[in-house]
Amino acid sequence: MFFFSQNKKIKNIAYLLFTKIVDQARKPFFYTDWMVSDNVDGRFDLIILHLSLLINRLEAHDKDKKIALLIRYIQEALFDNMDMSLREMGVGDMSVGKKVKAMAEAFYGRKMSYTKAFLSEDKNFALNIKPILVRNIYRENTPDDIILNQFAAYIKDQAKYLESQSENDIMTAEIFFKEML
């Protein structure tokens, strides 16, 4: 009985964390200042970026079974959200599964790209992340280099800020993203 209540608690925390990720990805400066398209694709890609930042932080400590379970439930929250969003947009039941599968593949591909960039040395981070941002966030609407440099610095700052937060902060869904000035 304890196992199931513990799992339910971790699942609830994962959904709270996912809500914080979505809130951060919906900050207006991404769309107004950094020219991310304010459409389904742009919002999806910003959610994936922030989810990747948090999962990367958690994976550094994934030997803990609770953390591994939390990662799984956060990903489940993403897929549940995608399913619900597609249905709300009027996608038919027969094609929701195919679309969620395509979005899941996009998530795992983007997450792998972000993880490689996160693991790069500090001096190479901006060089490594900028093409990933162009490909994943901007697609064909590449902004100028100033915006890409600001975005790269933002990602690096967020990763450090998440790293500074304790396991207890995470396991109680009390994490925060760094505010933009």
Image (cartoon, rainbow, N blue to C red):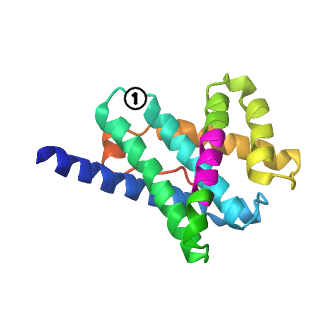
Residue at (67, 22) in percent of width and height: 121
Q: Is 45 above or below relative to 133?
A: below
Horizontal arrangement in the rendering, residue 122 relative to residue 171 (left or right): right
Q: What's drawn in magenta, residue-wise?
A: 99-110
Residue at (65, 40) in percent of width and height: 109
Badge 1 marks a residue whose secondary structure is loop
Q: Position of residue 106 (x, y in %)?
A: 65, 47
**Residue 108 drawn in magenta:** yes
Q: Is 95 above or below relative to 177?
A: below
Q: Position of residue 69 (x, y in %)?
A: 34, 40
The secondary structure that dominates the magenta segment is helix
Residue at (30, 33) in percent of width and height: 65
Can residue 45 be seen? yes
Between 59 and 174, the residue placed more toward the observer is: 59
Task: Report the residue that reaches farthest toward the top.
Answer: 121
Give the residue number, with chain letter if any, for mark 1.
61
Task: Report the residue that reaches farthest toward the left.
Answer: 1
